[in-house]
Every structure is written in structure tokens, then in C-alpha cells.
Image (tube, grey):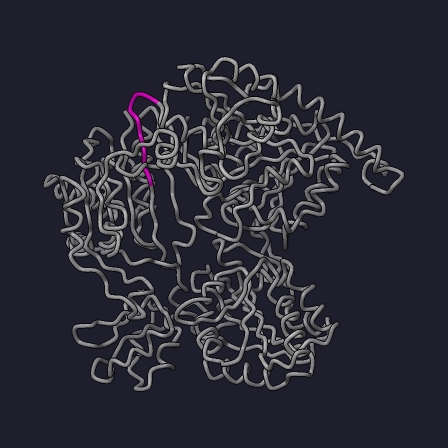
Amino acid sequence: MTKNILLVGVGGQGTITASKLLTLGLLESCYDVKMNEIHGMSQRGGAVSSDVRYNETGAVDSPVISRGDADIVVSFEEMEALRWCDYVKPDGAIIVSTEHIAGLPVMTGRVEYPEGIVDELKKAAKTVLVIDGPAEAKKVGNSRVTNVILLGAIVKYMNLENIDWHKIIRENVKPAFVDLNIEALELGKTLGQKL
Amino acid sequence: MRYLMTGNEAVARGVWEAGAEFAAAYPGTPSTEILENISMYNKEDILAEWAPNEKVALESGLGASMAGLRSFVSMKCVGVNASADPWMCMSYSGCNAGMVIAVADEPGQQSSGQTAQDNRTFFKFAKYPFFEPSDSQEAKDMVKEAYRVSEAADTAVAIRLTTRVCHSKTIVELEDRQEYEPRSYVRNPAKYVPVPGHSPALLEKVMSKADRLRQYSERTPFNREEMYDAGIGIICTGVSYCYAKEVFGQSASYLKLGFLNPIPMDKIKTFAQKVDKLYIIEESDPIIEDEVRLAGIECHGKNVLPKHGELLPDVLRVKLLGAILPAADIDRGKIVPRPPMLCAGCPHRGFFYELGKLENVMVSSDIGCYTLAWGEPFNAGDAGICMGSSLSLGHGFQQAMDKKGGGTKVVSVLGDSTFLHTGIQSLMDAVYNNSSTVNVILDNRITAMTGHQENPTTGFTAQGDVAVEVDIPALCRAMGVKNIVTVDPNDLSAVRGALKEALARHGEGPSVIITRWPCALKKFSQADKAEFPNLFTDRYSIDKDACIGCKLCLKVGCPAITFESAIKKAEIGGECKGCSVCGQVCPKKAMVKKEARV
């Protein structure tokens, strides 16, 4: 059976890096893995999304996740969670990092950043886990590892602990940041227990 | 060993495995990463070159094939338009060593825009056989097969990709590079010089090639049946095959077409007879469908499916099954759009801030990051049709406006790479026809929007060799431009002055303003560091006591600046690159230099 993980955020948040690590891990234990990215203008403040699909025993067909078909939607930014929350299965889960990144219409003062997002998310999915990503990342000493914390939460929720994630991190992260990222992953796994 | 590769990486790998030795391209989403990946191979294996435009890339690719080496060219969908001239004639001449051309279309226009043109229509028009892969493994396999077909049939062969194939990662098995014997060059003007004495015979040859390729199309395993339930039969191609299988699984049968033009009509007829109801699922134009209908076969396609955009599983479910997956019905009214914007430190910011303030000016823009300035907060961009169009469109607008006495003045803008692509001739036109336009070349020292590729002004080649740099001011002077000035776009008063003076010289021939400052995201060369002092080393913060909450700094549209409604003060975040533009706009000089980056 094909499982679906949708990662969304804003360019520069490490969404693509997290999904890359995720797919490399899945590749070691699954029959098939596909990943699709929309990142055309992500460097320029645009929304980024990354669809990760895997099947332990059979083929994955579409590289794109359908609306209502994601086992989990993981958002690196609060409003992006709202944009994508209808992609989650009604009995699935949403993880949202509460970081706010104002888009152009908010910055120019034309509209306010929306409020009450988490309440809206709770209508979309059975389970919603709210994480203050940057604050959690500071606990391990570097605000840039929010993405790997979220990866850890995914690993926990999707029962992917059979994969050697420490090895994936060691092989794909600069040596100086390996320990930091492993710590972030473990913190994410702990946070993921709440799901 | 299994690897996860994007379609673009897999095409590059296929080119290398096929033993090709020359590759050229002009960057363009979603095709850019193909040549980027080829350029990572050893030069002894394959030469990878950025060309100034797609026409040049295609012509140099043909030259390499004529000389006897397998060659490769890639481009985005609209690159085909820029290179249509050689495309048309090369199908008559054919090639020598195998030649493969990858074209990346964008149904749905997710990331680059411009057009959703279906180049399969062009390939039919220009008489090229082409492959259409569904995933990365097929992309690699088809590239290698395309070289074999190219040499067997004496024609360049196209690979038609779409964004989802280019940018999706799927599993690929790698193989070794093939040993390949270069062909010898034999002079043959009757093949490569399409004068009237040669062309009709060449066209006759193209037609007989089509007959042989039709037989190939019937027998190649890239056109294959997958029979499951025969109630519904689906003919599909490219990523549409993946979408159809996602939705129908084994409740339908498939005829998956991977080699098209000519299409395998016998195979199609046989398949149609086996199934009760026949659907044709192809994104964009009804290329297959039209031929199937012409052959008198009853089928459903564009009569039930959207005529443009992607045919994602969600679309197929609604249109063909009348059903959607259960999902939350949320209030989308709260969701604020997130349009792309100029990055923090972008050297276009200062220039467009000043340009946007000018009144009675028509801004003729072009294709690049600066296209984004058309909207809020700059509102500086009235048109931006295609690569290199700004200077010529602006010229025509100005001539007409002057003739009718309208008074509107034109400022045409384009980037360094776009100027070299096809802007040079437009500037030549403006000089030759004594235009009054102000022509601005935004030189950010790199081809930025596609992700930082070298070009003839940057001093490096695709494979990292030092290159001769085009001297833009000297080039403009050589074409006859009298008024040329170079400014630092982060210096607002200098930009303001240059624009004012150029506009005042209306009637004295076209003028050129060159803004010169590197893209903030660029990997800076030694030359950059030497030329541009304190290159993005400053950082700014807001003196909260000085800030009066006037929001003027928000008008520079910088992602580093936010406004804290609770205290009615602006705030500068960690993304600040120290360009100082916001500080020059602030009436209270509330932006203070924080610390120097080590």
C-alpha cells in the first residue's frame, strides 16, 4: 500500500532537504519511492511543497499526492499548513510548526496574517501536533535544524524507526553538523510520540 | 544499485551513458538541471556548454554531430520558439553522429509561466520523431534509445519532458558508459546546404524516413499494452500514464505510448478492438487523439477532459469517475497568497523602487527575476512578452507614442543574460532607427532566476574554466549608443539621477543605463570580491526609538522587513543582506548598521 507524506513550507526553510533525507531513508527499505517538488521560485519567498510517496512491497504510480490522500501533512510554516491541510486523509495527521513568514501581501500591509489557523486545521484532520519549530531547534542549539526535528516526528508517526536514520544523516550531512542533526532527529521523535 | 533521480538528472546520466561528447543548452525552467548535471562530468568524457540562447545551442549541437561526436541539446518549452529556425532545417539535413534534443514543457505552468505550449505539435510540424518518458528510469532509457534511432534514421530525435517528469525523483538503475566509436566527417553539401537544388530531395528523404520510423513505432517496446480489465482502455503518454494508473489501477487496460511521431496506428487499432470504452489521456494538445479520431476509432479525450492544465489524479477522478477522495472542506478565504518576490539583498530592488515612482513612463520588461517587479510594491513592468523582447517592444512603443504625440516615455529593462540571449539585436534596432528609449541592462553578474548559471559576461564556462568576459558598455558603444552610464543599483540617488538624465535626453537617440551589482545569492568570484567593496557584509536593524511606524520601508518589498502591528514599528529579520536600500527610504534614518559579518 502506498503511503503519502506531504511536506510544505516557504523557500529557505529546509523543506527540500528534509524530504531528501526522508526519501534516501525510504529508498533503503521500500520497493518503490517517488518524490515530487514544486520549487520554481522558492528562493524568492514562494511556497514550496514536496510530495513523498512510498510503497514497501509494490509500485508507486503518481509522483503527486492527491487531495485527501496524505497520511500526514507536515508544514514548516503556519499559514502553509492551512493552504495544504485538505490534502490530509480525514483520519490522518497534521504537524505544524508555528513559525510565521509573512508573504508579500502581509508585508506591504495589504492584509493581516490570518489568525485561528490551528482551529481550522483541527477540522481537517483527526490529529494535529503543534510545534514551535524554531524554539525547539534552539534547544539543540541551532535554529536551522527545525527541518530535521520535523523529520524525526514523521519517522515516529509513520513507524519508520526500522530505518537507520543516523546512518542517513551521517552520509548526507556535513560532518560538523552530524551530531546536531542526530540530536534534532531524536528530539523530533520524542515530540512525535504525542501524535 | 538503485538511485533516486529527478528526470533531469536521469536525462543527463543517459546522455553520459550513451557516450555523448558534446552538450549545449540555455538555462530555462524546468530543463536547467539537465545541462548542470552534464557539466559535472569530466570534460574528457563530455564537453558541456552554456550557449547564449537556444538557437545557438542547437546549431552548435548539430555542428558537433556533423563532426562525428554524439551531441545533446536541452531547452525549456519556449526555447523551441527561439530556436525554431535551425529546428526546421535540421530535420531536412539530418545529422551524422547521434543527436538528441530534450525539450521540457510545462502543462499547468507551475514555476516558469510564459506559455503552456505543447511542443509535440511542433515536433510533428518540424518532422521529428520523439520519445515521451513517464519517469526517470524511462527518461534515461529513452535518451539512450534515441541515440540509436538518431543514427539509424539519420535524424535528430527529441525527448519531450514535462515539469513533473523533470522535477520528480524516481528510482533509476545506473549502467556504465557505452564505448562509442566517433563517426568520421565527410563533406556533403547536398545534405547540409538546403538550396533549391538540394531541398526537395532532402524532403523526399524525410518522408521515406517517416515510413521506416512508423514500422519502428509499431515494434518498439516503448509502445506497449498492459491488459487488465478490458471494460476501459486508456491510451496515455508521459506522466499521464502514472496518473491514469493511480486512478484506475487494474480496473482498466493501458496502451502506453513512449515513442510518438509517427504513432503506432496498428497497435492502437488492435488495442481499441480489445476494450469496450476507449479514453485518451494526454496533457495539453490532443496529438494522439486527433490521429485516432481521423482513423475512425471511437474514443473519449478532450470532450471529457480539460483542454489545458495538468491531468492530475484529482482531475481524472472528477472528470472520468465523477468522484473525489473524501477530504476536509476548509475555509480557503483565510489563506493569503504567497507570490514570489525579490530576495533580501536583491540588486534589482533599489533600481525598481526608483523606477516605479516615475510618472508617465511605460516600463517594457523582460524575462528574469526582475519580471516580478511588475506588481506590488514596485508596479514597474507594463509588458514582458518573451526573452529579449523588452528593448524592441519598447522601441516600437516609443516610436508610435512619439508619432502620435502621446508624451509617454519608455524605459526598457532586461538582465545581462537576457540581453545576450536576444536583446542585442533589439538594442541595435533602437540605435539604427534612432529610438528615444531608455534601455536598462540589469547586470547582476549571473543568470539568476534559473539558479545561477554562468554566461558570457560572468568570466566562467559551464564546466568552471576561466572565460573571456563580454564587456557590456563596450558592446553598446560598438553598436552606436552614445549615452551609456553604469550605476550601483543600491545607491538610490545615483539611480534616480541616471534615470532623470536619460529621460531628459529624449530625442538624442537611445541611451543605456547599466546597473552593476551581483545577485545576493551568487557564489562570489575573486573578481566579484575585488570589484564590489563590502559585498553584502553589513547587516541592519531598526532603532525602535527612531522608527515612527510610517511603513515607507515596506515599499521596498524586502522579505527581511516586517511590520509589528502591536507596537507599530518595523523590524528587520535575519535575512538582511545589508543592501541599505530601506535605510535610504526611511525619513527618520531608523536603520542602523548592526555588525560586520566575519
A44, above or below B199, in the image: below
Position in image of residue B597 (x %, y %): 34, 69
Question: Which residue corresponds to the image point at 44% horizontal and 71% vertical from the top-left?
Answer: B379
Position in image of residue A97 (x %, y %): 20, 51
A98, above or below B147, in the image: below
Q: In which quarter of the image is residue A185?
A: top left
Q: What stretch is highlighted in magenta?
A: A51-58
Question: Which residue corresponds to the image point at 50% horizontal and 29% vertical from the top-left?
Answer: B237
Q: In which quarter of the image is residue B170?
A: top left
Q: In this view, does B476 lie to the left or right of B136?
A: right
Figure label count: 0
Image quarter in which the C terminus of chain A is found: top left
Q: Which of A19 and A127 is in front in this view?
A: A127
Position in image of residue A76 (x %, y %): 25, 51
A43, above or below B345, in the image: above
A118, above or below B492, in the image: above
| Residue A146 in sight in this render | no
Question: Which residue corresponds to the image point at 47% horizontal and 54% vertical from the top-left?
Answer: B451
Q: In this view, does B286 lie to the left or right of B98?
A: left
Q: In this view, does B499 lie to the left or right of A28?
A: right
Image quarter in which the N terminus of chain A is found: top left
Q: Is residue B201 left or right of residue B410?
A: right
- Residue A176 lies in the magenta-colored region: no
The dominant secondary structure in magenta is strand
Residue situated furthest left in the rendering: A194
Position in image of residue B591 (x %, y %): 30, 79
